[in-house]
Each structure stands twice: as C-alpha cells, then as structure tokens.
Image (spheres, coloured by chain):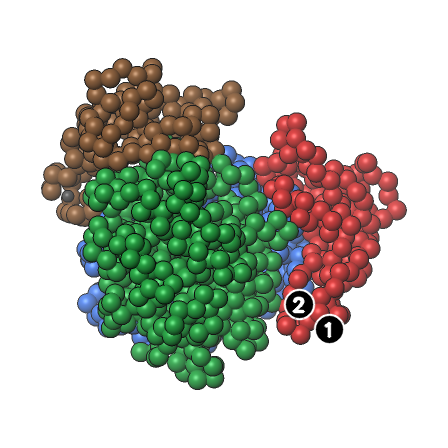
Chain colours: A green, B blue, C brown, D red
Amino acid sequence: MTDVAIVGVGCTKMDEHWTKSLRDLSTEAGALAVKDAGLDGKDIQALYVGNMSSGRFIGQEHLAALAADQAGLIPIPATRCEAACASGSLAFRKACLAIKSGEYDIIMAAGGEKMTDIKGPEAIAALMGAADQEWESAIGLTFTGLYALMARAYMNTYGLTRDELSQVPIKNHFHGLKNPLAQFRFEVTAEQVARSAMIADPLRLLDCSPITDGAAAVILVSDRVADRFKNPIWVKGSGQASGTLALHDRPSLTEIPATQIAAKRAYDQAGVGPQDIEVAEVHDCFSIEEILAYEDLGFAPKGKGKDLLLNKDTWIGGRLPVNTDGGLKLGHPVGATGIKQLIEIVRQLRGDAYNQVKDPRIGLTHNIGGTGATALVHILGKER
Amino acid sequence: MTDVAIVGVGCTKMDEHWTKSLRDLSTEAGALAVKDAGLDGKDIQALYVGNMSSGRFIGQEHLAALAADQAGLIPIPATRCEAACASGSLAFRKACLAIKSGEYDIIMAAGGEKMTDIKGPEAIAALMGAADQEWESAIGLTFTGLYALMARAYMNTYGLTRDELSQVPIKNHFHGLKNPLAQFRFEVTAEQVARSAMIADPLRLLDCSPITDGAAAVILVSDRVADRFKNPIWVKGSGQASGTLALHDRPSLTEIPATQIAAKRAYDQAGVGPQDIEVAEVHDCFSIEEILAYEDLGFAPKGKGKDLLLNKDTWIGGRLPVNTDGGLKLGHPVGATGIKQLIEIVRQLRGDAYNQVKDPRIGLTHNIGGTGATALVHILGKER
Amino acid sequence: MESAPLYWRLKRQKYNLIGTRCVTCGESFFPPRSFCPTCRRRGRIEEFQFSGKGEITSYTIIKSAPKGFEQFAPYTVAIIKLDEGALISGQVVQGTPATIGGRVVPVFRKMYEEGKEGIIHYGIKWQVDGTAAEK
Amino acid sequence: MESAPLYWRLKRQKYNLIGTRCVTCGESFFPPRSFCPTCRRRGRIEEFQFSGKGEITSYTIIKSAPKGFEQFAPYTVAIIKLDEGALISGQVVQGTPATIGGRVVPVFRKMYEEGKEGIIHYGIKWQVDGTAAEK
Ligand SMILES: [Zn+2]
Ligand SMILES: [Zn+2]
C-alpha cells in the first residue's frame, strides 16, 4: 500500500479580494505551494480542485481546467470535486486515492472560492445550494438558520448558555490574532458576541463565518518520491461519509453521524484514537458546530463539548489546541477551507505555524459540507 | 495493479422530464444499474456522481450526497466530479482510481443533469460556464458559436462541405432509431439538415445536441470480486488531459490536443491502437466535433475524417461503427453523457445493445468538456 | 425560491401534505421518497396522506434572508415532527410564538412572490395550535 | 454577461487592450496572463499594449443568443489573431462582412445593457479595416 505525504503548502490571504479573480487567487496559491515544495510546475502530474459553487458565484464551471490553464499546467489531468463546504477536503482525499492507485507520484490539490462578486442575499441563496433546495431553501431557510436550529436544540437539551457558546468565537478570534492570512484580526469579548447582530436566532454575527474570497493549495507525493523532500508530513488516515442532505431527515439535531463515521474510518486507518490527537482544525462554520465536532470526533462525551472550552483544553497552550489559525471565523472561502485546514496542521507538524503548538506529532482536520451531508476527517502525522 | 470491470449499467430515457426531478432520475438510473449487476444497494461502497451545473440548472449543489441520500446509500462516501460536459467520464475515471487504490471493491459511478427547469437563454448561458466566462461568455459567445468557429475554420482549411458535415446527424439519427432511450427517434435527410434553423452560422439546429434531462449509472468492481459477476467488461485504458479553457488560446481551431493526449494515454495503457477499436462512442455535441474526434483519436488522418462517413466505415455494419446509440444528438444531459457512452460500449461488448455490432471485443469512449479543455478517453474490452 | 417547474412539480404534494409510505417496513416519508432507504428494492412505496399536525423540535427566527425572502424577514422556521412520524422544515406563521415541544397545525398561506409583479406562490405553513395568527 | 465586479475588474484591460508579455521568452498574452505557461516561475510578466489590429481566423453569426444578449442577435463573433501575436474572441460590428483572413481594427462600442433600465456596458469590438459600419 502506497503512503502519501504533503510536501508543500500555499495559501492566499482570506479576504474580500475586489481586485482579484478566482483565476488570480488559485494561481497565487498554487505557485506558493510549488515553491514551498521546492518543485517546478512541470513536476506536477495531476491537479485536483475543490470548489463549491463557482457556477453561481462567478458564472464559471469547469474550474479545474481553468486553474490548470492559468497556472501553465496544461495538459495534465484536472479534476474538480464538489461537496459544498467540504469540497477542499474532498479534492484532497481524491488526490490521495489517485496517488495510492499508482498512477501518479506528485499531485497538487487545491481549493478556492470567489464569493464577493455577487450581492449578500444572492450569496446566501447560493450557499443554500449545499442544503435541500426543494424542501429547505424553498421555505426561506438559510445556512445560519439551519445551524441555529441545531444550536437551539443543543442548548435546550444540554443546557449550553449563550456565554458558553461564545467561547468558540472568543477562542478562535484570539488564535487568529497571530495569523497574517486571516480576514479579521481582532479579539472579541462575550459581551461583543452577545450584542452582535442577530442573524438567525439564536446565532449572531460573531457566531458566523464570513463571506470570503481565497484559495489554498498543497502538494502531495507518494512514498516512492517522498525522500526527495525535506519535512514530509504523512497522511495517516482519511475518512469520508455521507448523511441526509436535509437536516430534518436526521433523527437528532445535536450530532452529525457523517462526522462520527468519517472519524472512525480515519482513526482506524491511522491506528490512533481521539486521545492521540495533539492539534486539530475543526469545521466551525458557526460556533455551535465546533462544539458538535468535539463530541462527534470523540474529543468529549456527548453534551460535554463545552468543557473543552471552559477548561481551556482547546486553546493554544491546552492539551488539544483547536483551530489555532483562527478557524473559519477568520475566513471561509468554502471550496478552499478544507485545504486551508490541512495547511495549518502541516505547518503545526512541521513546526512553522504562525501560532505554534509545542512539538505536536499527530493532528486532525475535520471538514463538513452543508449541515453534515458530507464529512471528511484526515489525520496527519510527523512520522510515516 | 488492480484491474477494474463494469458489471452493471442503468440509464433513464433521454427526455424533457417535466414530471421528474434530478433526484428521481438519478435514483432510477442507480436502481437499474444495481439490479443489472445482480446486487443490492447495501453492496455499494462508494458513489461518484458527474454533474456539470446543477447549481445553475436547479439551484442545488452537493449533488452526490443528495443522490446517495435519495438512493438509500447513506453513509457511504459520495463524490461529485465536474468537468463540464465531460463530468460523467470524469466521475467514472475517479471511481476507477479509487478501486485501484485498494480502498474499495464495488463502486457506483453515475452522471445526471436536469436542464429543462430553466428557460432556453438561461440554459445557453449556464452551459457557457464550461467556457471562459471572462473572455468568451462576456462577449455573447454560445457553445454552438464556439463549435461554429471550429466548423468554419475546418471547412475552410479542409474543404468540408455542408452536405458532408450533414452525414454526422444523418448517421446518428439513423443509429438512434433503434434506441428506445433516445430523446428523438426519426431519420433526417441532408436537405432537412441544410434547411433546419441556423443557430450559429454555419451550424444548424440538426447539427446540435438537444437540451435534455437524464441520468445514467454503472457499477464498477475490482478484479478481486469480478468473478462473482456474469459478463464483466474490463476497463483496459483510461486517459485524461486538459487544454486551455478558451478556444482562442489554442494555436489551431481544427484539432483538440487534449483528446489526442488522453487517447494516447488510454491506448498505451490498454496496449492497443486506433486500428484495434471495433466500436466507439465519440463526443458529437455538434456535428463538427465527431469529425474532429475521428482525427484526434487516430481513426483517420488529419483532414480525412469525413471519409469514414462517406465510406460508411462509421455506420452500423461498417468497420468501426461510431455512436451506435445515436450519440449526443439523441440526448445530451451533460453530466450523464460520459456514463451513457460507457453504457453503450458495455452493451456492445456484452452483446445486448439495441443496435448491436457483430461481436466486438474492444470499444472506446471519448468525452470532452467545453471546447476541449477537458478530454477523457476510455477503452473497454471483453477480455481482462 | 423555487423555479416554476419545481414549484409545479411538487405543488400537489406540498399543498396537500401528500408524502409516501413504505408498505414493507411501515416507515412514512415527508418529504416524499420514491425509494425506501431501509428496504431498498424490497420496499413498496405508496402515497400517504399526512395530517400536518405535529410538534416543534427546534426553531429559529431568520433575520438575514436569502434572495427572494428579504421582504418577509424576520420570519420563523421550525423543524416539525409530524404525528405520523416524519420530520419536515416549515415556516411558522407570524404572531404565534414557537416553543420546543409546542403543538402545531398546518395552514395555507402565501409563501413568496416571484419578482416585483410576479406570481404569488402559496404553500403550507404551520400555526401554533389553539392560537389565531395572521391570515 | 458579466457581474459588475468582474466588469470593473477587467475594464481597464478590456477597454484599452492592455495585455501582458513575458520578458523572459517574449510571448505576449491577450487576454492577459499573470503567469507565463512556458517559463513558469522564471517568467517575468509585464503589461503590454496591444494595437488591436489583426486578422480574422474564423467567425460565426450567433442567431440563438444567451440570456442578456437576446436583443442583439444576430451578431458576429470572430477569433482575431492580433498583430502582436495573441488570439482573442471578439464581436465584429454590424454592417461589415467578416471573412477568414480579413483585416480588422478595434472600435469602442456598446456591448450590452444590464437589465431593462440598467447600466450600459461598453467595450471593444472589431471592424473590418477600411469599412464604415454602425456607430
Ligand atoms: Zn421500507
Ligand atoms: Zn515566458
């Protein structure tokens, strides 16, 4: 069985990039990753691109071929993968499988989204393409609304308070202070979160990830060539699972089964458990989801996710720092997000993160699409 | 190296399905394929779905998870692949790589598109998402227009006449007469083609594939389990390549380099050449493209593609029948097309095609996205 | 918002709360499913009339609305566990406060308008049982 | 049609036929590229002014138009090989017949209107050299 390692990373700033198109952003991220790996573009054998909705955001499909074209990578195979907000991780996982198939040794997996070319209500509608168009979008639900339904159910069942929930944005904004690529770099207080605009009750503005433009890319290689690179970070486990598209089709609103199943696969493949993870990036598109992720990933028992925040376990300096780059609150260009998460864990394991955890050896990324109709979990390790 | 075989196929009628949604169509095609393979849905380990632009056609992304959900396949991994009109073949190829990786033994690869929920001019604009939005769509180009640019250049360079070009729809409509799944089942004459409405000069209505709803699915298995199935058809070669997104960025308008490169890879992998192909499905989105494909695939020397039509070589009964199911003229639900092509070749090799070629042993499919920014070529064989 | 073809395709089911039921295992589906996820090919699907009565399992008040719904915000959306067993997302009519566990009944209401002088789309919303709210 | 941000982002380049050129290998790009596909990281990209003069390599007359362009059909679109070496798709102004090999020069024209009473977008079209066509 072939092993896969990540040997180069590149990421644009997360921002409202008025002067840059998606082709500019993806070329920038790709060039940074190729350079970081010490390669030349001609060494790349295939390209995988995660993108959710370029058709609606910029009127452009066929995005992987466009990215290959603009980056001078033609004629290599270029594949776009889509699973809403999990598109980046999906592209990464498909790139891993392509290397394991034996057909390639060096692949670029990238993700990007250009979300600010259309107006706010149009972007909200486009993002609802990740949910059930016939039965959720059609009655006026929004993504914040769907997570608000989960948040209220969770608060009602497990007694989570507003101020406890606010610990998620407070921690992640604090972590993001050190990240030069973050869209926002300021601290927030519980009072600021509680007073920020209501978007979908009970979720407020500071519970939400912003509308962001950005792109990110990594270079993956097989074990056959990995020794040519300094500091390869190994893909120890990769799990993917699906759930119902509509939130209302699930028996419980306070857990995401696809995360649980994807995590089990990834842990089994890596031969580790939740207790072995030393740094993690989890999908905090809305504050509540970080707490659900703690529980679905096995970091905390059901209903006890908040303890990791209150005990500072998931803060930098704690036993399992989570979202050390600021998480999605600091920018969520949906197709890029999964790759951006992997980049943070690679940097943490290499030891060159902006907000470095002390010498971690095993890290995890968790990326979901929609309200959890797709979940991907990856486990990376410093050793093969 | 793992070998991959196709053991089940299923396809809806190509039609304007006013009463059916994409979820209905994909479930129908998937159930047919599972039944054809003699399997139960619970045997499927992963799902790959090709779809070009469901975001714009029906406001729905995250389509693979939706398809898994509706087909009762949750929680298996579900992956959407997109490369415009080549999305179906792309999903198929990624499913092959996933089996070769060793992680799966039984996968469903499907494709679907629901194109008739929006109005004609909106559909024309949505399809232009396959081309360069910034520099082609922005000046009012259409897909027919892009192929018209190729057609005029080819006619000018190689002396192809209107009536010679018309041999493509004449042949394919004749082939499609026997196909109960075809959107249209009538013969056309050279006079009818020449008098049909001008869409983008010199291409006329009968040169164009229609706007279609439809879905198609195949079941792929590894050689580890293939002997459990009767009549497996083997994937002997698979090639994928990219070209510039914009037509104007290519040095020649009368050939598609991505097809040539993808074909070479597929031939090399299969250990065969163009002379060994006994039946083929090529991407005849517009009449001119079938002639370009003959040349790019090596079936005819440059400029001589029309001879295969005039000599009846590519008609049923000829030495290399092409588009025996009627081709894309008989329905082109873009995301489904690549899978539909594979199904026709599987049926030809199994011996249960509607328009059966006498005992072919090796067949080929050719599927492109846009004007050839993506090309995929697959070679299937009766023997492993 | 829905495209016109989608609206017309699902109108009968959405207007009349017609779902489906798998005769083989007895599970009922609203939104209707054409395929039983449990029984798969052995499942036998038939139409099933829901009463629309049920109980709120969670709710939210949407302040920031998507395109097409801006003029209705704020509005309440809930997940309702129907008495016959399925769960569905639906709008709760204005003027009646939603609560988790609260009983609701279906009412026929305007959903949204298409464009400025466009077609008015009607559909089912839910009303807290025993209250009188906006028509 | 283009979104407003895309229109504004590329306005300067599209209005003025400003492309790019790789100093390393000498290749010129219009549409502009920010990355030389030949030289890649060794490439050095700078702005390059195209004259817009060139030759038609192929053309079509669009009868069935996409959304936003319906009222202009039929209109002619050509691929033009610019004298400085790059190829570009462009509209040929009405009233001058396109031919393969025909020489063209750029002119500034209305491209389309956004919505009914919307913003008028201008841009470059091409005119057959030596002819006088619509303004
Ligand atoms: Zn059942
Ligand atoms: Zn250069």
**Disc on res. D24:** 1
User: How busy is the neighbourhood of tag 2: few (under 14 within 10 Å), some, or many (20 plus)?
Assistant: many
Q: Residue at x 57, y 58 (%)?
A: A25
> Which image quadrant for residue B59?
top left
Q: Label 2 is found on which chain of the structure?
A: D
> Which image quadrant for residue A356?
bottom left
Q: Residue at x 62, y 56 (%)?
A: B246
Percent position of residue B68, x then y: 29, 51
User: Which sits in the foreground, C9 or D17?
Assistant: D17
Ligand 2 within 8 Å, label 1 CB: yes
Percent position of residue B369, x then y: 51, 56
Percent position of residue A194, x then y: 39, 40
Q: Residue at x 43, y 42 (%)?
A: A192
Ligand 2 within 8 Å, label 2 CB: yes
Q: Which residue is mark 2?
A: D36
Q: Looking at the image, can residue C127 be seen?
A: yes
Three-letter code for the amino acid on which mark 1 is drawn: Thr
Q: Are marks 1 and 2 in contact (CB under 8 Å)?
A: yes
Three-letter code for the amino acid on which mark 2 is drawn: Cys
Tags 1 and 2 both on a single chain: yes
For label 2, the SS is loop
User: Which quadrant is the C terminus of chain B positioned in?
Assistant: bottom left
